[in-house]
Image (spheres, helix red, strand yellow):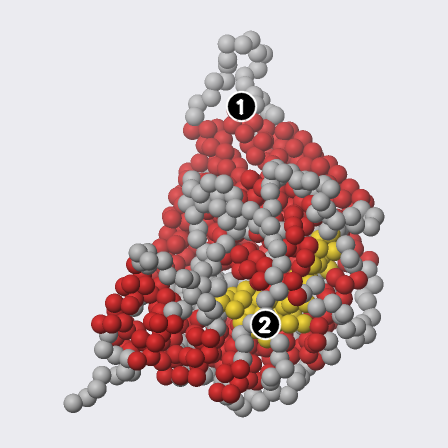
């Protein structure tokens, strides 16, 4: 697809005249967003939706089927341990197994529902061009210390796609920065002005930076809603790595407009643009296996669905009235600002009577994934803390039962790792006990036969096979659906390529699983012991991590794998063989992590035709356009430019920047900001711009860049010292 005419030969900033008259944001249109209570709820203050069909059949299949499968697994496990005397450790093993098996049984049954629906549904015919929405929608992209060329290139590509549908008049576009890096802040402003120059004077594209990123992303969105939300019926939320086609965005807007009871409508983002080995594993799994899981979830959830925080459209006034984030009592990690706010926003929207649901087959919705195992672990640590915070939100007043199930699923997604680890440890201890601790065969109680410490080995092997089948079945269901679809099959390397790729994904995921189990177990322990994760910007670009960092991160995992291997052989060679996938993943943790972020490994698999997806074989036009725009912007080197130099060397840009700062807080006599005082003192001492730039710390630079008086001092400094 070709967007509107754009001069790709030059991506220069706007002319001085354009800059002088350009407002970064439109006039404010306030909208109240009261903080919601988790302990009080008035059902009278809710939206009254029309009566809708509840998906009882899908829910019965998932939950009753999951219960039946769990009961079967529990009975089989009881038969395994019920040979001879059942000890405390055996009861512990049974208890842990039932919890863990129930978790995967529910996921299995949900996948069954999704699989059957995808197999039986008829492929829809190509839609007619979407109708122009009558309601106004704000497309908002929160950004936090991101690479400006990537973000602004992506936003322009999405803008062009929507304009090409002929429906552009219904949308306004907002880049909402919480950026704390002063150089990136100035680069964002320059990129914004350049994009406005390229798109022309009629483009409704805006940029806002918050001086303080209070409440992080939730606070960023809330700031927009309370200041500008009154102007918009809907709000479509993107992430910094999001891409959506024009058809997808217009379709979401039309779906929201057609359903007055909808509060949030979520699309299913597919992973694209990834090249490292680990990222391509995630990309393949999301594309081939993800639709099975997402469709099953969408079917049983119905209008009681969940929200993933991006690539979704929201009814603005309902969101403002009912989704103001509370601050949890106590200190982080389980108190303070809610990290995984998207789940909570969906819960509050449902509590207020609005529907939350997913359109899993909409298409045209994309995102990116972390490029390496360590990058995934860093993001996962924050998600872990956010999901464990939901333990405190789970009993909130007025929540719907499916909402509580979504919370429980998210919590269990992280508690599962320590529970699986505990089950492994208990199993090893039982084997160790039977091998090295002399049992009391004849107790004081009269018995005709001794109490031999035994297990039903044959039954245990059968149960192990059932567990593996339940775990792996969704992957093979996804494979079947992909092979059935001719375009997916053709663009993923054919049936043989899909089968080979699925087995590669299963093997590699099995090796990475024990490493992630230990990482998540460590995260859970740290969070429950009171360690906060903070909020660092994500690494989005492909690339490897220094070997020293990898060794430091995984040396304990590798050591544990070696110890487990030796202990397994000493206890029982069959135990070592049974645990070989887990042991192999841990022993190879360092090379596996190193390979995960390597472009060479990922591209080698690509050349072999493995882990290919349709979106990789035939990249979406919007991804091609976004990558081209991002590369062209990056070539101008503004991403790496010193912010002080940019604002010092361009008086017109500096005046525009000052004009966007707003009104300074009134000075209170006798109240001195220490950081500002230090910044002012350093500027007074500096002889050149270079000295000021070197002396000022990032926090002090931010203070200078948002203070008119200090900017005037900066502007008067010479760029270089005068020569004799």
Asked where in the image residue 525 lies, by quadrant, the reply is: top left
Q: Which residue is mark 2?
A: 26
Asked where in the image residue 199 lies, by quadrant, the reply is: bottom right
Taking 220 as reference, is 711 left or right?
A: left
Residue 545's x, y, as percent?
41, 64
Taking 319 as reference, is 594 left or right?
A: left
**Which is in the foreground here, disc 1 or disc 2?**
2
Q: Residues within 10 Å of mark 1 (few under 14, many from 20)?
A: few
Vertical position of residue 249 compared to residue 61: above or below: below
Q: Secondary structure at mark 2?
A: loop
Residue 201's x, y, as percent?
60, 84
Q: Where does the N terminus fall, quadrant-wise?
A: bottom right
Vertical position of residue 200 compared to residue 253: above or below: below
Q: Which residue is mark 1?
A: 87
Q: Earlier in the sequence, mark 1 or mark 2?
A: 2
Q: Where does the C terminus fall, quadrant-wise?
A: bottom left
Vertical position of residue 604 compared to residue 11: above or below: above
Residue sitting nearer the eye, 320 or 626: 320
Residue sitting at the far left: 724
Say which residue appears at 19% left-offset and 88% top-offset. 723
Can residue 33 be seen? yes
Say which residue appears at 50% left-offset and 83% top-offset. 20
Vertical position of residue 204 compared to residue 33: above or below: below
Q: Secondary structure at mark 1?
A: loop
Residue sitting nearer the eye, 59 or 237: 237
Residue 46's x, y, as percent?
72, 46
């Amino acid at each position: 697809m070709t967007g509107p005419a754009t001069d790709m030969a030059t991506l220069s900033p706007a002319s001085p005249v354009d800059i002088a008259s350009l407002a970064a944001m439109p006039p404010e249109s306030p909208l109240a967003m009261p903080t919601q209570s988790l302990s009080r709820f008035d059902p009278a203050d809710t939206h009254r939706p029309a009566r809708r069909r509840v998906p009882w059949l899908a829910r019965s299949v998932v939950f009753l089927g999951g219960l039946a499968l769990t009961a079967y697994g529990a009975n089989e496990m009881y038969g395994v341990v019920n040979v001879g005397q059942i000890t405390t450790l055996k009861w512990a093993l049974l208890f842990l197994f039932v919890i863990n098996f129930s978790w995967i049984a529910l996921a299995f049954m949900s996948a069954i529902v999704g699989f059957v629906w995808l197999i039986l549904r008829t492929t829809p015919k190509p839609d007619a061009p979407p109708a122009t929405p009558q309601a106004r929608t704000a497309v908002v992209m929160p950004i936090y210390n991101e690479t400006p060329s990537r973000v602004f290139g992506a936003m322009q590509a999405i803008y062009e796609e929507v304009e090409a549908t002929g429906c552009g008049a219904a949308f306004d576009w907002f880049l909402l920065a919480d950026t704390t890096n002063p150089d990136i802040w100035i680069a964002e402003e320059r990129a914004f002005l350049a994009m406005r120059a390229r798109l022309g004077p009629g483009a409704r594209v805006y940029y806002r930076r918050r001086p303080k990123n209070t409440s992080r992303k939730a606070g960023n969105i809330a700031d927009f809603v309370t200041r500008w939300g009154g102007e918009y019926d809907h709000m479509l939320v993107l992430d910094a790595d999001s891409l959506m086609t024009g058809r997808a965005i217009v379709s979401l807007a039309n779906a929201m407009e057609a359903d007055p009871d909808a509060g949030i409508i979520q699309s299913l983002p597919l992973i694209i643009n990834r090249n490292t080995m680990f990222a391509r594993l995630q990309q393949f799994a999301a594309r081939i296996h993800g639709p099975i899981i997402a469709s099953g979830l969408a079917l049983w959830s119905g209008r009681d669905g969940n929200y993933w925080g991006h690539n979704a459209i929201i009814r603005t006034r309902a969101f403002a009235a009912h989704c103001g984030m509370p601050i949890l009592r106590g200190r982080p990690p389980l108190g303070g600002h809610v990290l995984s706010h998207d789940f909570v926003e969906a819960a509050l929207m449902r509590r207020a009577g609005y529907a939350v649901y997913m359109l899993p087959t909409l298409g045209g919705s994309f995102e990116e994934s972390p490029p390496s195992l360590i990058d995934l672990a860093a993001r996962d640590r924050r998600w872990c803390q956010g999901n464990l915070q939901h333990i405190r939100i789970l009993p909130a007043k007025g929540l719907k039962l499916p909402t509580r199930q979504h919370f429980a699923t998210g919590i269990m997604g992280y508690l599962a790792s320590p529970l699986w680890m505990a089950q492994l440890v208990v199993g090893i201890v039982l084997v160790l006990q039977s091998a090295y601790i002399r049992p009391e065969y004849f107790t004081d109680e009269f018995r005709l036969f001794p109490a031999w410490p035994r297990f039903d080995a044959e039954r245990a092997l059968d149960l192990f096979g059932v567990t593996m089948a339940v775990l792996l079945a969704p992957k093979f269901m996804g494979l079947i659906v992909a092979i059935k679809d001719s375009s997916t099959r053709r663009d993923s390397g054919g049936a043989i390529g899909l089968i080979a790729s699925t087995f590669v994904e299963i093997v590699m995921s099995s090796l990475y699983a024990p490493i992630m189990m230990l990482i998540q177990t460590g995260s859970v322990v740290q969070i429950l012991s009171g360690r906060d994760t903070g909020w660092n910007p994500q690494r989005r670009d492909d690339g490897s991590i220094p070997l020293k960092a990898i060794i430091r991160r995984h040396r304990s995992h590798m050591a544990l794998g070696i110890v487990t291997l030796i202990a397994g052989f000493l206890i029982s060679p069959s135990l070592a063989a049974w645990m070989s996938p887990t042991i192999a993943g841990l022993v190879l943790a360092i090379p596996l992590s190193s390979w995960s972020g390597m472009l060479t490994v990922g591209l080698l698999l690509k050349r072999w035709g493995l882990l290919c997806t349709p979106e990789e074989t035939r990249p979406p036009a919007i991804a091609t356009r976004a990558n081209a725009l991002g590369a062209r912007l990056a070539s101008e080197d503004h991403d790496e430019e010193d912010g002080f130099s940019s604002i010092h060397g361009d008086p017109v840009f500096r005046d525009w920047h000052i004009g966007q700062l707003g009104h300074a807080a009134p000075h209170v006599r006798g109240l001195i900001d220490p950081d500002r005082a230090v910044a002012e003192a350093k500027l007074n001492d500096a002889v050149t711009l270079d000295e000021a730039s070197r002396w000022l710390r990032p926090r002090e630079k931010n203070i200078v860049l948002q203070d008119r008086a200090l900017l005037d001092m900066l502007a008067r400094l010479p760029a270089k010292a005068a020569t004799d």
